[in-house]
Amino acid sequence: MDAIKLVSIIAAALAVSIGSIGPALGEGRSVAAAMDAIARQPEAAGTISRTLFVGLAMIETMAIYCLVIALLLLFANPYAG
Amino acid sequence: MAASPLASTVLFNVGPVSITRPVVTTWAIMGVLAIGLRLLTRRLGMHPDRRQAVLELVVTGILTQIEDTIRKKPRPFLPLLGTLFIFLVAANLSGVLPGVEGPTAKPETPAALGLIVFIAVHFYGVRAHGPLGYLASFAKPKLIMLPLNLVSEVTRTFSLMVRLFGNVMSGEFVIGLVVALAGLFVPIPLMVLEILIGLVQAYIFTILATVFIGAAVDTAD
């Protein structure tokens, strides 16, 4: 196994593991805030959860970007020959 | 090594164009949806029976969601967004059927859908503001925001595509890995989760398309 493949695998693992920390913290904060808001105003639960879902999808995209980068490194690496 | 989730299998060639597996699956879904819904909506009456009541529930549900999001008359946007939602639900859930892999688990189909949304946003924007008015809306609130607005047009469409592709693909990838490692009936809870993710992603794709179109046709300022 040559060095580029080895580095690609390590980089893919690093991309997913480090890249998922930020979105995880962000999603935790937003869900906590949404629960707080629903507890205060249960009648607004519909609007809050719809906005929450859209926001979670936005945050989650960052983690998905890292996953796609990892897959590109593993399966479509332009330097691995 | 597992098969690459980025590449598609070529089934046959029509002249210089190779027809891949997701394309054939998409055609099958389109055929089933077009013929099935045509048959379902054949005899609509003033006093709905059970079948018509379910259909009306779906259509009014989509209409309410669009109206809640963009706060305008939702009817002009229903053909595009409703079709998008129903197709996405069918496409995301088709991966659960044995032997079928969902077309949204490959990058091409989400890219095509993202392109449709990208063009539709500008179409509705130009129709609401006129060509010059719509171009001027990129320089709001200040002229210095112009490059950022232009870049965000591209990146948000790209993220729309990557989000759908990544979520559906990662679900199927994980199920494939668990089948290979653990055995036949172990990934059933994961497949249930995959159904939920497919529905949520169809909803989110449609809602984000609605938000983008709503921002383009917004005449508040």
Image: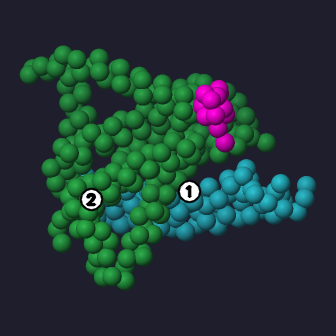
Q: Is residue B135 left or right of residue B91?
A: left
Q: Write the residue at 45% across / 69% down.
A: B151
| Secondary structure predominantly adopted by residues drawn in magenta | strand
Q: Chain of mark 1?
A: A
Q: Amino acid at mark 1?
A: Ile
B112 lies left or right of B169: left
Residue at (51, 42) in percent of width and height: B109
Name the quarter where the C terminus of chain B is drawn.
bottom left
| Element assignment for label 2 | helix
Where are the magenta residues, as a range? B7-21
Residue lying at the far right in this picture: please name it.
A1
**Quarter-of-image position of residue A32:** bottom left
* Residue at the far front in the pictured view: B15
Q: Is residue B114 left or right of residue B166?
A: left
Q: Amino acid at mark 2?
A: Gly
Labels in figure, total: 2
Instruction: Spot the green chain and give its letter.
Output: B
Read off the chain for label 2: B
Which label was assigned to residue B125?
A: 2
Task: Look at mark 1 in the image and give the residue it sits on.
Answer: A64
Indicate how the structure is coloured in the image.
by chain
- x and y, in percent, of residue A16 in the image: 65, 60
Residue at the extreme left: B46
- Between A71 and A22, which is closer to the camera in this rendering? A71
Task: List x then y, in percent, for residue B139.
Answer: 31, 76
